[in-house]
Amino acid sequence: MTAPYEGGCLCGQVRWRATAEPANVRVCHCRNCRRAVGGPFFARAVFLAHDIERTGETTRWPTSERVDRLSCARCGTPTFAEPKDPPARLGVALTSLDDPGALVPEAHTWVSEKLAWAPLDPSLPRFEKGPA
């Protein structure tokens, strides 16, 4: 599948549409991401901000000095991660895609914080922290 990509939250109040290919698609295993999404990792695609449109009311909170998280204000679905450093971009949960198989992760990051029982795709590159 190629752009555009579309998705949204569980209740449908938040919707997004990306008109270009993502800058990267990765699975992050860091503790902040795991806690923010309530799962063993955060599988996400990062798009340049000007390539993504979004509608609906979200809540926003910082999970570190670098990243804000956004969730649907109605159902609470964790939908976006917004890095604060330039360039402006937006991480979108792969599970929020209307077709969650449309984008496939290309790497695992922060495997130094990975849960021991969480499997890794052996064909993907691994980074102990973030990629260089």
Image (tube, helix red, strand yellow):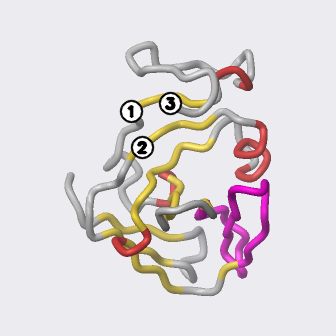
Which marked residue is nearer to the observer: mark 1 or mark 3?
A: 3
| Residue 42 point in image, percent of width and height | 61, 43
Which marked residue is nearer to the observer: mark 2 or mark 3?
A: 3
Q: Earlier in the sequence, mark 1 or mark 3?
A: 1
**Pointer 1 and pointer 2: residues touching (CB < 8 Å)?**
yes
Tell me if mark 1 has few (under 14), some (14-19) or many (20+) residues whose alpha carbon lies within 10 angstroms of its own: some
Residue 110 position (above or below residue 12): above
Q: Earlier in the sequence, mark 2 or mark 3?
A: 2
Q: Which mark is residue 132?
A: 3
Circle 2: element type? strand
| Residue 101 point in image, percent of width and height | 36, 45
Specify whether residue 124 is painted magenta: no
> Which quarter of the figure has residue 34?
top right
Distance from Cα at disc 1 to Cα at disc 2: 6 Å
- Kind of residue at badge 2: Val
Q: Earlier in the sequence, mark 1 or mark 2?
A: 2
Specify whether residue 68 is painted magenta: yes
Q: Which residues are magenta?
A: 59-82
Residue 43 position (above or below residue 11): above
Residue under label 1: 106
At 55% from the left edge and 79% from the top edge, which residue is drawn?
14
> Which quarter of the figure has residue 62?
bottom right
The mark total stands at 3
Distance from Cα at disc 1 to Cα at disc 3: 15 Å
| Residue 38 point in image, percent of width and height | 75, 48
Viewer-proximal residue among 4 and 97: 4
Q: Main secondary structure of the magenta part?
A: strand
Residue under label 2: 25
Circle 3: element type? loop
At 65% from the left edge and 37% from the top edge, which residue is drawn?
41
At 21% from the left edge and 52% from the top edge, which residue is drawn?
1
